[in-house]
Amino acid sequence: MKQISLLGSTGSIGTQTLDVIRTNPDFFRLVALSAGSNITLVLEQIREFKPALVSVMNEADAEIVRKEVGDYTTVLFGEEGLMEVACHPLSDVLVNAVIGSVGLKPTLAAIKAGRDIAIANKETLVTAGHIVTTEANKHGVSLIPVDSEHSAIFQALNGENPKTIDRLIITASGGSFRDRKRENLEGVTVKEALNHPNWSMGAKITIDSATMMNKGLEVIEAHWLFNVPYEQIDVLMHRESIIHSMIEFVDRSVMAQLGTADMRIPIQYALTYPDRLAREAGERLNLWEMEKLHFGKLDMDRYRCMRFAYEAGRSAGTMTTVLNAANEVAVAAFLKNKITFLQIEDLIEESLNRHILISKPNLEEILDADQQTRLFVESKL
Ligand SMILES: NC(=O)C1=CN([C@@H]2O[C@H](COP(=O)(O)OP(=O)(O)OC[C@H]3O[C@@H](n4cnc5c(N)ncnc54)[C@H](OP(=O)(O)O)[C@@H]3O)[C@@H](O)[C@H]2O)C=CC1
Ligand SMILES: CC(=O)[C@@H](O)[C@H](O)COP(=O)(O)O
Ligand SMILES: [Mn+2]
């Protein structure tokens, strides 16, 4: 029986993680969870899974939840609550499915407490990948990818010598505006941007897919998870999101992982690795139904966020912290109709251009770069 702590239980990955746990009660047990402000859903989750510890975003909501749940469940809130859930003494593994760099400190706390981490929260790796991976190595903790592309690479790497990787090939759907030219992106709406062609996901990552910042964040995520230089990480346009990613090895053999667009597959694999569990109810991938798979070359002028991400990744240090923080604030502003879709890119570019790089930042310097960038972007709204 694997005991699980879950950050972000009310989100897209969080609810699918609970589905995996629900479907396999003999293998998994939820011991702690955190949510943001969706109190109706978190109360349902507490009634169903009876976790020993719950955390919500603010104190008033914690009070509401406390009144509704039995003595068995302790209810905390805020940053302290996230840290306690991340390190719960009964848990074997943390599923980090929170959105944004708010996931960084709980991740580091879980690593220091010796918990393995199934990581969906890519912003944490983009914000401070060097600190997270160094700490994980130091404490002998595994970072197991949940993101579909990284799970694909992880699966393709199983049993291989990582030194024989020649190139990672990360696939990209192109997002909701992939069939529009740049000049036709002026005035696109939030509703249109949220219409991802293949995946049903949370709002922030769906906008990131539309700008292709998601792919940029994933290139940086892959760099840290697999220790591969940026020169050896390519992005391949692939409309159908059926091939989740590939590795080209030095002998020119290419290993790919395929599957339907169902995140419960990589979530479950992250929890069962190195074993696999049957998913009897899971939809099969019937390639004959697709007839064709499409592939294309990445155009960095069309998708400026891809260029920003590669450049920030190569600059390293605090530059990727700034990339992520600027993107988080700009996307939140777009979702609230405060800026246009194309202004997301402009705000990120401006933030990167004005930033004075710290090459080997400590945690304090990372948190400061993150905060200063947020303040700067907010001042431009
Ligand atoms: N969705 C997907 O298919 C995929 C997602 N990912 C990555 O997984 C992560 C989660 O994405 P996704 O599930 O789509 O996101 P969602 O927006 O659907 O869910 C985010 C979760 O985090 C909680 N949350 C938000 N802000 C805070 C905060 N400040 N403090 C505490 N909790 C907070 C939300 O709570 P509440 O809703 O209660 O307010 C919710 O539980 C992201 O890093 C994303 O890039 C990676 C691959 C695929
Ligand atoms: C499901 C998942 O992992 C997402 O990150 C997804 O890959 C988004 O797809 P695109 O960014 O390729 O549109
Ligand atoms: Mn992905």
Image (tube, helix red, strand yellow):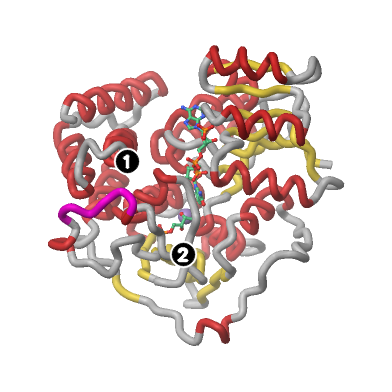
Q: Please provide percent x and percent y for residue 167.
A: 43, 65
Q: Is mark 2 within 8 Å of ligand 2?
A: yes
Picture residue at 57% right of the left edge, 23% below the top: 56
Q: Nearer the viewer, residue 173 or 44?
A: 44
Q: Give the structural element (helix, strand or loop) at label 2.
A: loop
Residue under label 1: 335
Q: Is residue 307 left or right of residue 111?
A: left
The vertical placement of 53 against 199, above or below, is above
Sort mark 1 into few (<14), some (14-19) or many (20+) by Cα contacts within 10 Å.
Answer: many
Q: Is residue 113 left or right of residue 130?
A: right
Please tell me which residue is depicted at 18% across the width and 42% down the height of the picture: 349
**Badge 2 is on which residue?**
198
Q: Is residue 86 visible?
A: yes
Residue in the image at 69% along x and 37% along y: 93
Prevalent SS, magenta region = loop
Magenta segment includes 244: no
Q: Is residue 273 left or right of residue 136?
A: right
Amino acid type at image mark 2: Asn
Q: Secondary structure at mark 1?
A: helix
Q: Position of residue 212 (x, y in %)?
A: 32, 55
Q: CA distance from mark 1 to mark 2?
A: 20 Å
The kind of residue on which mark 1 rests is Leu
State which mark lies toward you, 1 or 2: 1
Residue stretch rendered in magenta on the structure = 186-191
- In the rendered structure, which disc, 1 or 2, sits on the residue that comes first in sequence? 2
Tag shown at residue 190 = none
Q: How many marks?
A: 2
Residue 343 picture location, percent across and down: 18, 44
**Quadrant holding the C terminus:** top left
